[in-house]
Structure formats: C-alpha cells, structure tokens
Image (cartoon, coloured by chain):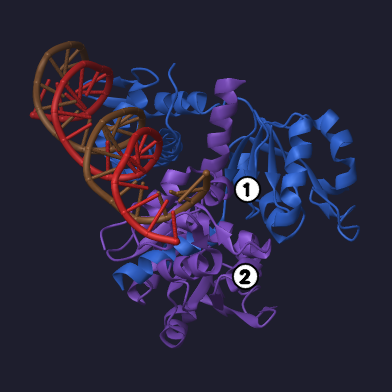
Chain colours: A blue, B purple, C brown, D red
Amino acid sequence: VPAVAEPTVRRLSRYLQAVEDALRSGDRTVSSGDLARLADTTAAQVRKDLSQFGSFGTRGVGYDARMLRDQLRNILGLKRAWQVVIVGAGKIGAALAQYPGFAEHGFHVAAVFDCDPAKVGNRWGRLTVCDVTELEARLRTVRPDIAVLAVPSPAAQGILDRLADAGVRAVLNFASAPLRPPPGVEVRHVNMAHELEALSFSLTRQG
Amino acid sequence: VPAVAEPTVRRLSRYLQAVEDALRSGDRTVSSGDLARLADTTAAQVRKDLSQFGSFGTRGVGYDARMLRDQLRNILGLKRAWQVVIVGAGKIGAALAQYPGFAEHGFHVAAVFDCDPAKVGNRWGRLTVCDVTELEARLRTVRPDIAVLAVPSPAAQGILDRLADAGVRAVLNFASAPLRPPPGVEVRHVNMAHELEALSFSLTRQG
DNA sequence: ATCTGTGAACCGGTTCACAGCC
DNA sequence: GGCTGTGAACCGGTTCACAGAT
C-alpha cells in the first residue's frame, strides 16, 4: 500500500462521519455523490480516495453503507481501542477529558496529569489527576498510544520529549509553541490562534 | 492582489508566531532560513510566500524583525481588534472564553450565549451568559465579526443560519457536524475526532 | 560572502472522461 | 440507466536555481 496523502486521511475521516450519518438516517446504500455532498468534496474525489484501499462499491448501485463504515473504521485503525493520556489539567484539559467524542470513537482516556499541587488528587469522574512527576512511572503501566498536550507553551517541548522517551508515538498538541517532534513521533497541532488569524485574513480581504 | 492559497495563510500565521519568538529572544533581524526553521518549512517557501505581498527583506541581510512582524500583522488583518461572540457555554465554550490567546491576538470576546436556564445569568469574569433567544437582539448592538460555535452538533446548523442572518461572516466551528455555510460566510472547523483519527491512521500504518 | 526576490521546472493531488459492471 | 474504478490530463502549490542587491 503506497503512502497516503494527508488531505486524503482528513477526507476519510469525514467519509466515516458521513456514512454514519447516512446509517442513522436509515440509508442502506450510499453513492460517491452522496458522500461528496455530506463531506463537502466531489464524487470523483471520493472514488479516487476509496480506490486507494480497495474496491468497496458496486457499479450501478453504490456502496453498502454498513460495509463501507466497517472498511473505513478498519482503514483508519479504529477497530481497536486506543489508550490516551492527557497532560495538563487546566480548562482545556478538563474540557477534553470529558469530551464525549473520545469514547464514541474508541479513544479511552486512561490518565490525566498536572504539576499544580492544587489540582493533583482532584477527581474528574472516574479519573484522578496525577502529579506530572509520576508521568514515567504511570506510563509504564498505562502504556498509552496517544498523548494530548494541554500544557502552557513553555512546558510543551519538555513534556513532549518525556512522552517520546516513554514510548508515546502520537501526540495531539494544543499548545501554541512550535514543537520539534522527536524521531518517530507524529505530532498534530490544534491552534486556535492560527484559525482565528485565518478568519481575520479572509475578513480583511473580502470586506 | 491575487487570490492566496489556504496553506499560505496558515504559514503566514506561523511566520508571525516565529518572528514574535525571535523578537522576544532579542533578534533584530531574521532570515528566511530562520523563519523556515521556526515554522517548519523551507527558506524558499518563506520567501515565495512573503513575496506575494511585497519585498520586505534586504538582500544579504534578511528581514527586520519588528518591521516584518508589523507587515504580517497587517497582512493578516490584525491591526484592528475583532469582536467575537461565543455560542455555547458548555465545557468547551468555557475553556475558550477564558483562553488568553484571544486577547493576546486582538480578539475581544464580547458575549457568550447558551440555551440552558441553569447557565444563563452566570458570570464568567466580566461576561454574563446570555439566553440564546436574545441572540439577534444582542448582536444588533455587539455587531461581532466572528462567532465561535461551541454547541452540540444537532444545534449547530440552526445557530449558524441565525448568525449569518445577523450579519456574521466568519465562524469557528467546534461542533462535529458537517455544516452547510450560508453564502458569504466562511466557516473553519476544529474537529478533535478527525485529528485523533488521523493519529490512529498513522499509528496503524507504521506500527 | 550573504541573503532576498522570482521566473522556470517540477511534482503530486485533483479533475476528467470513459470503460466496466450491475 | 446508473454508478464505480481508474488511467490520463490538468493544475497549482512547491522547489530549484540564479540574478540582483548589500
């Protein structure tokens, strides 16, 4: 299987959402045109993307919705549950910890860390906030696949390096610092400031 | 000025962050190579991007850091303050409302709305949560440029349409619904589930 | 010597168009 | 008739390479 372009991965995730919507609406079959409308792209793009992974459709008919959902889940690696830890128990960390989307998509939040003594020991539902000094020790038993970085920017690189040393290979970063990912670690960034600035840019150009 | 590609806008935002970092470090001048390193791209890309908006550098020297920061702020439309309203006073809305990055980048949160009677009237620092039934009335006086959508997915499209009718032309959406933006309204999406699924995909492929 | 600005070449993601199958 | 799968054409963003300026 050849390398897959990043935009393609993003679209696959939207197709999954689209086909799940279609299933909820009671559709048993979806066409590339349907998916394109729901995922805001073109029918040809949908077919090209899916064809990278196999021939899932039936000519003249479309895709069986349930089968396509399973295939997309499989492609995206969602057949198994992933263990997630959250580092940083501030407002963002708290919002994420109880974000229902984690569980819905098979991501299990196994631990939360912070360095603030006022927060350490607090109970968040079934979770207890751990001291970040115990990070390495706890990670040896939790063995998380993914870490969410929700710490202040100056602390982000240090925590990232510790996570990488502990074997974490995928990180979702909410800090606005430009991180240098250790080899073998994939970091994705969610940066509010960049999104707002992009909106500011487009408002400035057309208005 | 020709149309600007979306990836370019994202990079401009990173260049601004980079040059602000450089200024904090005391640098008076930055080269395209410096910016490339800080923004995780190439020197040629930096120069190409900036050249779309003018000739800001000095050959043999680089870019004056303060001047480049001002130019980037200008290009991104950050010379003025933007009025922002947040719709949805749940955990995400709350985290956003007190996110310091808003103020730091010149985005002023002017109002927060929710439909839950238990939340309406709550004070969040200088803000009071308003009932969403008062949305149109309040927007006539606030006249926001940007709205942040932090409501449950099923409510998102309805609120978006009301915001558009009220004259909002830029929306940052945190709901995971595939929204149909009314004409003239730019919607940007922040979708945790998609980011996690992209990480899941890459873990599955290389591991 | 160093670093910018930019036309030209390159490359890969997107779109097209049609053959293949129901 | 309708819809998928896919090679080919297209297109635009990225990279290259070098002239130009200090």
Is residue B29 visible in the rendered structure shown here?
A: yes
Q: Mark 2 falls within which chain? A: B
Assign the N terminus of chain B to one quadrant of the image. Answer: bottom left
Residue drawn at x 75%, y 59% is A90
Q: Which mark is residue B107?
A: none
Residue B185 in which image quadrant: bottom left
B12 sits to left or right of A89: left
- The image shows residue A137 at horizontal and vertical percentages of 89, 34
* Side (left or right) of A135 relative to B115: right
Neighbours of disc 2 within 10 Å: few (<14), some (14-19), many (20+): many
Q: Which mark is residue A100?
A: 1
Q: Residue at x 62, y 20 (%)?
A: B207
Residue B206 locus on image (x, y percent): 58, 21
Kind of residue at disc 2: Ala
The residue at which mark 2 appears reads as B97
| Image point (40%, 65%), residue name | A201
Q: Chain of mark 1?
A: A
Q: Could you say whether the residue bearing mark 2 is in a helix, strand or loop?
A: helix
Amino acid on which the number 1 mark rests in the picture = Pro
**Quadrant assignment, res A180:** top right
Q: Are marks 2 and 1 in contact (CB under 8 Å)?
A: no
Spatial CA distance of label 2 from label 1 is 20 Å
